[in-house]
Image (spheres, rainbow, N blue to C red):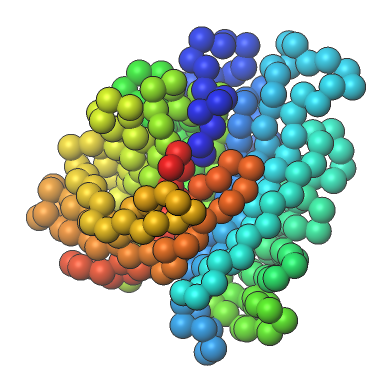
Amino acid sequence: FGYNSLADEHNNEFNLADPDYQITFPKDHGPHKNFRIEWWYLTSNLKSETIENLGIQWTLFRSNLTPISSKKPNKLNGFWMAHSAITTDKLHYFEERFAREESNQAGVKLDPFRAWIDNWSITGDDQLETIQLETSAIDFAFSLKFSTKIKPVLQGNAGYSKKSETSAASHYYSQPFYNVEGWVTLNGERHVVEGVGWLDREWSSNLLNKSQLGWDWFSLHLNNGRKVMLFKVRHASGNDFLSGSWIDQDGTKKPLNTSDIELEETAYSTVKGRQIPTKWKISFPGRNSLTLNINALNTHSWMDTSFPYWEGPISVSGDLSGVGYLEMTGY
């Protein structure tokens, strides 16, 4: 996420991502103490009889402003923030909510799993094999069941995900194998939907270093059942950092490094006065130069929130086809 303001490599009072840390479930589905930022993030590419393509995003962020060692009573030491959005080729609606750190207005608990802010929530079993997502906003609502039998995928090196060649890193895992069914309401009209879903969990205290500008992150559901995650962290010098994973149908992951990925912007759109890349070409030199073309479903998928960014559903064409999501920060 575009938290350059929180990037401070030299502050060791917060916990830092540790390459020796062993991610375990269900514990790591829950919150983590003394990290600057963490999130529970869901996207889904959906379709119905009435809408050919649409996407939803739901994210709950937990932010700590001060480390445990320097917390002061009665001060705002941390907060919860949530974003919910729905996108079709013609419209893009979003809402943002906030809650204080210690209020019952928002939180995440295990046994059973529950993540919530106000009347927005994810509930389910502690392994997150079946979860229910509920959101009600001014212009939209959705009620969606996500289900899978495949274990989560540990990104990076056993869940330790580097964001630069130096110190920036996070703990990161994904569940890209959800089947989704339920309904969405748009402008008062309900649509029965089905599709595929993706969960990302990440926690960090130094997500970006000071010379990094933001990132471009892709999650791809290919029609052959495989999944792809990749991201580029943009550097002020132009020496960008790329990383990702190629995930087979059974959840087996093959890491992708900078030499394994060629990522090229092929078209830009003017969004809120910014030039945003909304068409991309992704090539994989080690996979017989496999090439994927990425197109935004709606180029105006701008999240005009407290930390503004672009986030929306995408289509995949070229040597393979599919759908997915693209998030771009720092523009």
Residue 227 as seen in the image, left or right of residue 319? right
The reply to whether residue 182 is visible in this rendering is yes
Q: Residue 270, relative to residue 26: is it above or below?
A: below
Q: Residue 148, relative to residue 231: is it above or below?
A: below
Residue 144 in picture, x, y percent from top left = 64, 70
Which image quadrant is residue 65 in? top right
Give the position of the C terminus as an image quadrant: top left
Residue 30 as seen in the image, left or right of residue 331? right
Which image quadrant is residue 255 in? top left
Q: Residue furthest left?
A: 288
Residue at 44% x, 67% y is 298
Q: Residue furthest right?
A: 74
Residue 183 in picture, x, y percent from top left = 65, 78
Q: Residue 198, relative to residue 82: is it above or below?
A: below
Residue at 85% x, 46% y is 105
The reply to whether residue 22 is visible in this rendering is no
